[in-house]
């Protein structure tokens, strides 16, 4: 295996669905199935926070969701838990500034996809140096899906990273809907990472398609 190319990573970031069972109105399996039918390009298993499950049940859920992604050839990323990602043969891992250090994680996962959260230009530069394939930047807008989220930054944070020659693939996250997505892309993001605008939608596939349409404009 070789590291993913920057151009392929940018394609995968277009509509990045992040989800755990705690985010779903219906079963996580049917929520993900509909999102896959709508055309998500990347999936992150983020079983975390109030209402989430743990232990063997969490691993079993991860395996069932991974299978659904594999059937549609959509890469499966695990949030935070490098051990779980390695145990189930995930396609990648997403870590934040309070998680294991990116350089250590890169050593452990070899050429698997590595995503790192960055809130400042300095964090973005370090993430890139330490082997990140993409960075997640946010929260761009107010979010109800993460209790310990940093301060809202607006799309300008991505614009300023691009202005300082950060050419790493970037995905914006936090409070993004089809209404706010255009500004995130215009600021220089390669795609949008979304929890509630997809997981809580009445028509999940349609909500994904709306985000896709913003992306091709
Ligand atoms: C794509 C993407 N970007 C950012 C995050 C946030 O990661 P982190 O800061 O580690 O917070 P938690 O998600 O672990 O609560 C993400 N998960 N995905
Ligand atoms: C995981 C995460 N990291 C920064 S904001 C956020 C939550 C995004 O959820 P939503 O799309 O529902 O605002
Ligand atoms: Mg984390």
Image: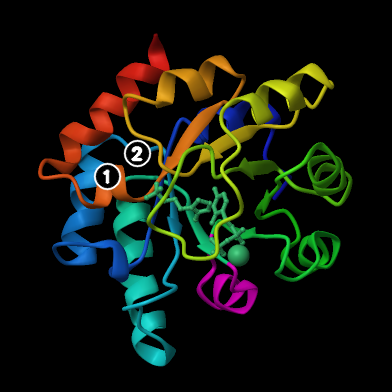
Mark 1 vs ligand 2: CB under 8 Å? yes
Main secondary structure type of the part rendered in magenta: helix
Is 183 magenta? The answer is no
Asked whether, in this view, residue 122 is left or right of residue 44, the answer is right
Q: Which residue is mark 2?
A: 40
Disc 1 + disc 2, Cβ < 8 Å: yes
Q: Which residues are magenta?
A: 80-90
Asked whether, in this view, residue 167 is left or right of residue 189, the answer is right
Q: Residue at x 41, y 71 (%)?
A: 47
Asked whether, in this view, residue 150 is left or right of residue 142, the answer is right
| 124 shown above or below 160 | below
Would you call the spot at circle 1 few (<14 residues within 10 Å), some (14-19), or many (20 or more)? many
Q: Which residue is mark 1?
A: 198
| 216 shown above or below 23 | above
User: Which of pointers 1 and 2 lies earlier in the amino acid sequence?
Assistant: 2
Q: Which corner quadrant of the figure contains ligand 1?
A: bottom right
Tag in front: 1 or 2: 1
Name the residue at the left extreme. Answer: 202
């Amino acid at each position: 295996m070789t590291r993913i190319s920057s151009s392929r990573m940018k394609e995968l970031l277009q509509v990045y669905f992040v989800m755990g069972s705690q985010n779903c109105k219906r079963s996580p399996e049917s929520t993900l199935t509909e999102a896959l039918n709508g055309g998500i390009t990347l999936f992150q298993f983020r079983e975390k926070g109030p209402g989430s499950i743990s232990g063997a049940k969490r691993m079993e859920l991860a395996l069932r969701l991974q299978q659904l992604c594999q059937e549609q050839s959509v890469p499966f990323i695990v949030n935070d838990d490098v051990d779980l990602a390695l145990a189930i043969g995930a396609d990648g891992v997403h870590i934040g500034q309070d998680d294991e250090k990116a350089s250590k994680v890169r050593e452990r996962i070899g050429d698997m996809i590595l995503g790192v959260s960055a809130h400042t230009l300095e964090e973005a530069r370090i993430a890139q140096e330490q082997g990140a394939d993409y960075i997640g930047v946010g929260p761009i807008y107010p979010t109800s899906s993460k209790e310990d989220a940093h301060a809202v930054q607006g799309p300008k944070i991505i614009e300023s990273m691009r202005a300082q020659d950060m050419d790493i693939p970037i995905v914006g996250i936090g409070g993004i809907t089809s209404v706010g997505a255009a500004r995130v892309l215009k600021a220089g993001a390669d795609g949008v990472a979304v929890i509630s605008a997809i997981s809580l939608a009445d028509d999940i596939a349609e909500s994904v398609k709306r985000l896709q349409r913003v992306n091709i404009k």
